[in-house]
Image (tube, helix red, strand yellow):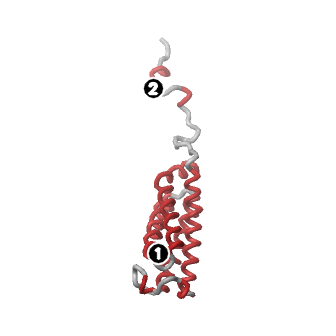
Amino acid sequence: MTDTSHRASSTPPAAAYEPTGGARAATGWTGWIVFAGVMLIMLGVFHVIEAVVALFREDFYLVGSSGLAVHVDYAAWGWAHLILGVLAGLAGVGLLAGNMVARVVGVGVAMLSALANMAFVPAYPVWSLIIITFDVLVIWAIIVHGREMKSVND
């Protein structure tokens, strides 16, 4: 009687061993996650810059606080941008480490950043539109390619 158990298997012998331990191998798209992490850190710095200007130099902006979409003074905007900046920087660092929580927080912070900058467009249009564009790219990169960074760091 011959042993035919190796023939009954549907997996060819060459594919039976996966060096990644079952995880998908990283592709070239992982660079988008690195881009998103670095951009979140940079967006955090940009928000901190906006916060410092809003807190200490209100006359820098094109309109007064009554001309903004949300009628609050620039000190409140400064604190909002400061909090968003810190959260974005931390999410960026976590995203570079492949943390799942950082992916969720990164998308949330980028969405909040885009909304805050939409309301801030009358005060500083070019800067706000650039940040919104980066927010959209970060959201796309995290949602579409976020899982790949986890497989690299496993």
Is residue 129 or residue 52 the one in the foreground? 129
Q: Are marks 1 and 2 in contact (CB under 8 Å)?
A: no
The x and y percentages for residue 34 are: 59, 56
Secondary structure beneath label 1: loop
Q: CA distance from mark 1 to mark 2?
A: 59 Å
The x and y percentages for residue 101 are: 48, 61
Q: Would you identify the image quadrant in which residue 40 lies?
A: bottom right
The x and y percentages for residue 45 are: 59, 72
Q: Which mark is residue 10?
A: 2
Please name the residue shown 40% across and 80% down the image: 70
Please name the residue shown 53% across and 49% down the image: 148
Q: Which mark is residue 121?
A: 1
Please name the residue shown 42% across and 84% down the image: 67
Mark whose residue sits in front, 1 or 2: 1
**In the image: residue 39, left or right of residue 10:** right
Please name the residue shown 49% across and 17% down the image: 3
Is residue 110 or residue 94 the one in the foreground? 110
The kind of residue tagged 1 is Val
Secondary structure beneath label 2: loop
The x and y percentages for residue 140 are: 47, 56
- Within 10 Å of disc 2 (Cα), the crowding (few <14, some 14-19, many 20+) is few
- Within 10 Å of disc 1 (Cα), the crowding (few <14, some 14-19, many 20+) is some
Give the mark, 1 or 2, whose residue is nearer the N terminus. 2
The kind of residue tagged 2 is Ser
